[in-house]
């Protein structure tokens, strides 16, 4: 994985793009989450219309070994519908906030999907055989006259066209007063946690009618509220440890063995603020929008508005690595505040070996950082540069003075085009990037 972000020995190239090319994008088609499963064979997206689309990785072509297999649609289903809370007179959007795959135990696949209030467990299974030769009904399904049945038939399984079925197995509802922002499956594969602005609940996958409230930061008087929970995740190897981040830029690590209610954290991660750079926007841009453990469990990564930070779990005082995502926007915070972009919630992700990280920016740019070489690269997800197997050209933003030929001025960035959701294949250099209603898939160039 050396040079993953920008060495000469490594280049990213366009593989596929999914989605319509309409100028007028329907709100329901905007992708709101992207997630590979544990093997990378499946890739799921959720959108604002409550739909989940699953893509399956096709096997490579034997005649053309340099071409990796593509991801093709495997299953599409409506996961959530719009609802109305009559008690609070609130509309509940169908938008899918998060999807999390469960590790595969048998031939079926399971995933959790959630909107603002309700989490659902879906089973995705294949059928390629059907039973024929029933005794009590004909092949077309009509019941037979019992007096005409003179012999017993043994039903046989006949092959049929492959059918992929998505069926809801569990519905976990009525446990969150505020909007759910995170779900995370625990390493015991039996429990998972869900977080909203003020509380985190622990669920058992088999039990839908109750959950344990493990964090509650709601003050007795809501006027004293100073921070909210922004993201939460289970540690990948220890089922008793989880972290949650806050709008104040802090991260708390909790151990469920210490107490049933984890209001007291075990570790508290915060970077002291530089007083010289303090401004009106300091508090807003320090809010953490995403937190992710590394696969090894040794590190965690947090994304705030302008940067990505990597923390060693053994050092709480400051991050061990800080990467500036779009520092050139610091001078633009006033206009970003006025158009509400300053509240955008960017996600971040690790590559399979924890050696590189990726996160999104504006103008459909996304950034990669190589942790070993400290190199970084800016790439763009756009149909203009999406020629099959075409190498992605690094993009540069000029902040003032003379602009070079291949640079784009910071004043001409499109803030309506933003990469909030990205995912990295757990084992290969394949990435999925959601740009509004389009899903781009890029891979490393195989020479």
Image: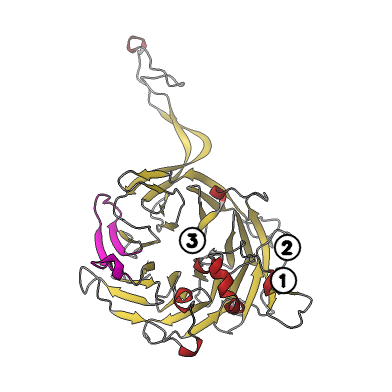
Residue at the location (52% across, 50% down)? 54
Q: Secondary structure at mark 2?
A: loop
Kindly check if marks 2 and 3 are in contact, taking CB atoms under 8 A apart as contact: no
Q: Secondary structure at mark 3?
A: loop
Colour convention of the picture: secondary structure
Kindly check if marks 3 and 1 are in contact, taking CB atoms under 8 A apart as contact: no
Above or below for 52 versus 346: above
* Residue 228 in sight from this viewpoint: yes
Residue 340 in the magenta stretch? The answer is: no
Using the image as rendered, state which of residue 308 and residue 414 is in the foreground. Answer: 414
Q: In the picture provided, is 160 more to the left or to the right than 176?
A: right
Q: Residue extending furthest left?
A: 259
Q: Which residue is mark 3?
A: 39
Question: Which label number is shown at residue 393?
Answer: 1
Q: Residue extending furthest top?
A: 147
Q: Which residue is mark 2?
A: 385
CA gap between label 2 and label 3 equals: 29 Å
Residue at the location (52% across, 34% down)? 160
Q: Which residues are magenta?
A: 197-225
Kindly check if marks 2 and 1 are in contact, taking CB atoms under 8 A apart as contact: yes
Q: Secondary structure at mark 1?
A: loop
Q: Position of residue 240 (x, y in %)?
A: 28, 70
Q: Position of residue 114 (x, y in %)?
A: 40, 53
Using the image as rendered, state which of residue 47 and residue 377 is in the foreground. Answer: 47
CA gap between label 3 and label 1 equals: 29 Å
């Amino acid at each position: 994985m050396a040079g993953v972000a920008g060495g000469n020995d490594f280049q990213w190239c366009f593989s596929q793009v999914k989605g319509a090319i309409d100028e007028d994008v329907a709100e329901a088609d905007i992708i709101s989450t992207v997630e590979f499963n544990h093997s990378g064979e499946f890739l799921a997206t959720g959108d604002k219309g409550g739909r989940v689309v699953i893509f399956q990785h096709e096997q490579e072509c034997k005649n053309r070994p340099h071409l990796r297999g593509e991801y093709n649609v495997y299953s599409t289903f409506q996961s959530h519908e719009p609802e109305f809370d009559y008690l609070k007179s609130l509309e509940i959007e169908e938008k899918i906030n998060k999807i999390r795959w469960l590790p595969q135990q048998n031939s079926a696949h399971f995933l959790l999907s959630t909107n603002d209030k309700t989490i659902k467990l879906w089973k995705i299974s294949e059928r390629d055989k059907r039973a024929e030769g029933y005794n009590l009904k004909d092949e077309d399904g009509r019941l037979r006259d019992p007096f005409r049945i003179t012999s017993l038939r043994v039903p046989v399984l006949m092959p049929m066209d492959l059918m992929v079925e998505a069926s809801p197995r569990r519905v976990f509802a009525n446990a969150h007063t505020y909007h759910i922002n995170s779900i995370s499956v625990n390493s015991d594969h039996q429990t998972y946690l869900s977080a909203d602005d003020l509380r985190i609940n622990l669920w058992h996958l088999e039990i839908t009618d109750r959950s344990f409230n493990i964090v509650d930061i709601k003050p007795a008087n809501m006027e004293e509220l100073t921070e909210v929970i922004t993201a939460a995740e289970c540690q990948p190897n220890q089922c008793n440890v989880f972290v949650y981040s806050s709008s104040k830029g802090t991260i708390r690590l909790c151990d469920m063995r210490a107490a049933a209610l984890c209001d007291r954290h075990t570790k508290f991660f915060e970077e002291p603020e530089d007083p010289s750079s303090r401004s009106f926007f300091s508090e807003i841009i320090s809010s953490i929008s995403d937190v992710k453990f590394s696969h090894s469990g040794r590190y965690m990564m947090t994304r705030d508005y302008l940067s990505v930070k990597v923390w060693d779990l053994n050092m709480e005082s400051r991050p061990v690595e800080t990467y500036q995502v779009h520092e050139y926007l610091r001078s633009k915070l006033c206009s970003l505040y006025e158009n509400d972009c300053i509240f955008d919630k960017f996600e971040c992700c690790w590559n399979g070996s924890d050696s590189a990280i990726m996160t999104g920016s504006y103008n459909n740019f996304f950034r990669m950082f190589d942790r070993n070489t400290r190199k970084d690269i800016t790439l763009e997800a756009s149909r203009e540069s999406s020629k099959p197997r075409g190498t992605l050209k690094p993009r540069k933003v000029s902040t003032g003075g003379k602009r070079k030929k291949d640079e784009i001025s910071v004043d001409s960035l499109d803030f309506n085009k933003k990469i909030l959701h990205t995912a990295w294949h757990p084992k290969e250099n394949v990435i999925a990037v959601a740009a509004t209603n389009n899903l781009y898939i890029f891979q490393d160039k195989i020479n």
